[in-house]
Amino acid sequence: MKLYSTNNKEHFTNLKDAVLKGLPEDNGLYMPSHIPVLPKDFIDNIESFSIQEIAFTICKALFNSTIPENDLKEIVYDAINFPAPIVSLKENIHVLELFHGPSLAFKDFGARFMARLMSYFDRANEEELVILVATSGDTGGAVAYGFLQTLGIKVVILYPSGKVSPLQEKQLTTLGHNIYALEVNGTFDDCQAMVKKAFLDQDLRNQIRISSANSINIARLIPQSFYYFEAYKQLKNKNNLVFCVPSGNFGNLTAGLFAKKMGLPIQRFIAATNINDVVPTYLKTGTFKPRPSVRTISNAMDVGNPSNFARMLDLYCSTGNIKEEIKGYAYTDDVTKKAIKEVYEKYNYIIDPHGAVGYLALKKYLDQNPSHNGVVLETAHYSKFKETVDTELEFTTEVPERLAILEKRKKEAKQITAEYNLLKSYLLEKR
């Protein structure tokens, strides 16, 4: 498998280097030089395959013998060992539950797969590998659980102070072992910018080995395509299929675009955001203007400069092509809160704030396209946003035991300001 940089299509590397380096030296993002179309009979008979078999088929086609089949199967089957069920709210509105993994967030798919792939590629190296990750909510927890106690790998998570939910923060800061947390006095975009700067700092990279666990790493992105196929498998009506994706850094939606390129018959994607709406604005105006993110109740989407936008442009080359594939909608906290209540009252289903944004966008789209069949990606368990959900529903929701036990654990995090030199000093001190 060959990959190129979005900033230089003549810059090729192999899968191992792309996964372990995270970012090319030119600050682009790695993209597969070839996205294979899966056999039509596989798509036509997808109901006969398990989610693990689907994931293995996708990886086998993409990786093109880069990893021996037995090793690849072991990686996939160990990483993807939990379900992604469809719940139908009504005939043409469905919810794809992606929170059945260890950290109760969709990012378990990417984090667990990436951890095993990195471990496989790095198994002969005796020098410690440091995984740097910025999080606006669920990424940090998923990466922490995915890499917990992995030999030879240390994880450093940067998160914006006061801008993740209390339970999300506990997932980042209470595991110990090889997981370290930096609480940054700033926004997610500040955290992400510091991580990116570390990758471009040759002096730092000469002293320690670093890699990324954000969706800028291709190893996080590829496994997120698995559940689009899994959702398609479960739907009785597979016609005029639309996926509505609550979006922040846009890795999840980009993975859906990969799935479509691989042959999955998806009619359209809906990019659903909160008021951090730089991509919906771009889809309307053709102008991409990053700006500082604003805090909302759907905090995982509080991103003002989404990294994966570069991959979206790379896949579709022009504004016109992207507009044909993606519709964009944005919503305020007030209407999001009302949607949480509406979904419960109409369908007896508890949805989290991110899923609620997706529900609103899908509902609006279906009003204009009633013959289409929509799936909202429910990216995290509602209990991670218990304060918001309980207030809107006016009763106390249950917290799964694996989250409830975290409330009693002591938070361990180093507080820093959003200055790159502080991150660099911390990493060098921790060698």
Image (cartoon, rainbow, N blue to C red):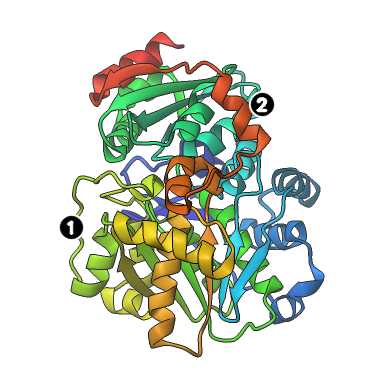
Q: Residue at x 70, y 49 (%)?
A: 80
Instruction: Tell me the residue at 56%/55% (across/down).
Output: 224
Mark 2 belongs to which amino acid?
Answer: Ala
Query: Of circles 1 and 2, which is in front?
Result: 1
Q: Amino acid at mark 1?
A: Lys
Near-viewer residue (196 or 357): 357
User: Residue 389 at what x, y percent from top left?
Assistant: 47, 48
Spatial distance from mark 1 to mark 2, Cα to Cα? 43 Å
Instruction: Work out whether residue 13 can be spotted.
Output: yes
Which quadrant would residue 83 be assigned to in this image? Answer: bottom right
Element class at badge 1? loop
Q: Which residue is labeled 2 in the image?
A: 124
| The N terminus sits in image quarter | bottom right
Q: Above or below — where is 346 with respect to 134?
A: below
* Residue extending farthest top: 429
Q: Residue at x 40, y 84 (%)?
A: 367
- Quickly name the residue at label 1: 289
Precedes in sequence: disc 1 or disc 2: 2
Q: Which picture quadrant has residue 183?
A: top left
Task: Give the side of residue 320 with respect to residue 87, left or right.
Answer: left
Question: Which residue: 73% across, 60% down?
Answer: 51
Q: Position of residue 268 (x, y in %)?
A: 45, 78
